[in-house]
Image (spheres, rainbow, N blue to C red):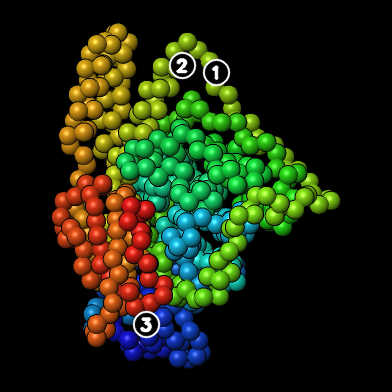
Amino acid sequence: MEPGNLIAGRYRLEQRLAAGGMGEVWRGTDTRLNRIVAVKLLHSGLSGNDRFRARFHQEAQAVAQLQSPGIVALYDYGEEHAPEGLVSYLIMELVRGQALDNVLRQRRRLSPNETLKIMASAAEALDVAHQAHIIHRDIKPGNLLVNEDGSVKIVDFGIAAAKGGAGLTETGTVMGTLAYASPEQLQGSQLTGATDVYSLGIVGYEALAGRPPFAGNEPTAAIAGHLTGQPAPLPADVPGPVANIIMRCLAKDPRQRFSSAAELARVCRAGGTGGTTAILASPPPSQSPQSTRVMSPAAGGAMGAAMGAGVVAAHTSPMQQQFQDDYGPAAGTGQYRAGGAGERPLPPPRDAEQPKRNPTGPILVSIAGVAVILIALFMWSPWDNEDDDPSGAAEDTATTTAAAEEEATTSEAEEDSQGEDNGGEEEEDQNTEEEEQTSEDEPPLTDLDDYTGQDVRDALDELENEGFNEVSVSPLAPEGEEYDTCEVVSQSPEGGAEVGYDTPIELEYIANDDACPDGNLGGDV
């Protein structure tokens, strides 16, 4: 597609805003209504694929049901034949602001007031979706657009699922982004709105701490953290009541979280405008590995993800100025006002069912915990690529089918338990040493995507989601030629190279916009 092209005879393409594995997003004009819009296009090569067309249609249907100032509005949807082939398109509201992940990349941390405002706005929008029986399943900073006035809009309902409804997800498939996935997503359990509450809690934690709680170099570490780990305490300058909000969102048992997104929004609004000391009950009891169970993956839900950053225009200075100095030396030392009259404490979280204790319980639970992590890892492995998925690693979400591998994983865990019962301590130690040696000698490798031609910010997001932790960027001055905004012009290693997740990766890009990174991101991605 080129600037000036008309979609459906009325939507004129003007400026490409983003490009990803599934398609492109353009700033455009509805020539009939003289209205600025965002035009989301599915790649012509994917429009002929029934699965990807269904995914695109899924997003249109989901967003069309939702009317909320916190959800990007859908104006039109359709398909038409063009010289490039069949074109599927969404016409959506154009949001003037920037994605939260860009804000965090520039700022690293937000103040408690900013964080609570963002969480409240997002939770109110999620409540609208949940009331319509739609679960987003991929809440993360890249899918939260911060408007010029500081309000938030949620985008990317491409993998949203109807509660209890059948959809496009195959049994044994995990959807979402690993760093923000809930325990029940990893277990393949039936999902409720509580999974979005958990993911939003991860976003809040990252905004306050500067990093997600369970983002490790290896997928196994992130999976284990979500299933059985406890997040590290938030920085000391985060008020205790604010930390309690975050930790309650991150409870392993969905019943221990806020009862609804609406309740979370109310608590965040109260905490952000004064008096957080009286509005929260004690945080839920810490979760132990015993509370994690292996559950059969539930069929249903929608498959895949449309591009996440689609409908946000290049960020503008008013929003940036608004966030500029909110997190200063005085944070946590008197900027929070005392609680006002009339504030009521929340009811305490519902107690989780206590498991019955028996002498063999700890051994069986330990084995089950190992099995859960292994199964989740196989279901999520970022280095596995589906042959029939042209989008590959460029998609923001990870999806790998593991139905055939689950049985083998479970049987391996059972064999390990038999060896333990037989008292083979010496053999176990030897096996452990061999496994550690093999792990050290053969780190996981993957094929590096080609990011040339992409917006460097999108490339950084994709590399971060893939798990690469040694990424640096180098800005170059534009020299005569026309380049897209922040376009990557070279990378090292080149696309297609087999690399490890700790391999240093360098991207060179054209710094032709104030929105481009400043080049000081090395090692922080």
Q: Nearer the viewer, residue 103 or 40?
A: 103
Quadrant in the rendering for residue 10: bottom left
Determine which quarter of the picture holds residue 13. bottom left
The percent coordinates of residue 474 (x first, y second) are 28, 66
Please, what secondary structure does the residue beneath circle 2 have? Answer: helix
Tag of residue 499: none
In this rendering, position of residue 377 left or right of residue 151: left
* Residue ID for mark 3: 15
Asked if the residue at tag 2 contacts the one at tag 1, i.e. Cβ–Cβ closer than 8 Å, the answer is: yes
* Residue 140 location (% of width, % of height): 46, 55
Residue that carries the numbered disc 2 in the rendered image: 361
Q: Residue 468 at what x, y percent from top left?
A: 29, 50
Query: Residue flagged by tag 3: what amino acid is it?
Result: Gln
Question: Which tag, 2 or 3, sits closer to the chain's start?
Answer: 3
Neighbor class of circle 3 (other Cα within 10 Å; few <14, some 14-19, many 20+) is: some
Q: Which residue occupies 22% across, 22% down?
A: 433
The Cα–Cα distance between marks 1 and 3, rounded to whole angstroms, is: 61 Å
> Could you tell whether 195 is left or right of 341 in the image?
left
User: In this view of the protein, which residue sits in the foreground, 236 or 214?
Assistant: 236
> Mark 1 — residue?
356
Nearer the observer, 358 or 144: 144
Cα separation, mark 1 vs mark 2, equals 8 Å
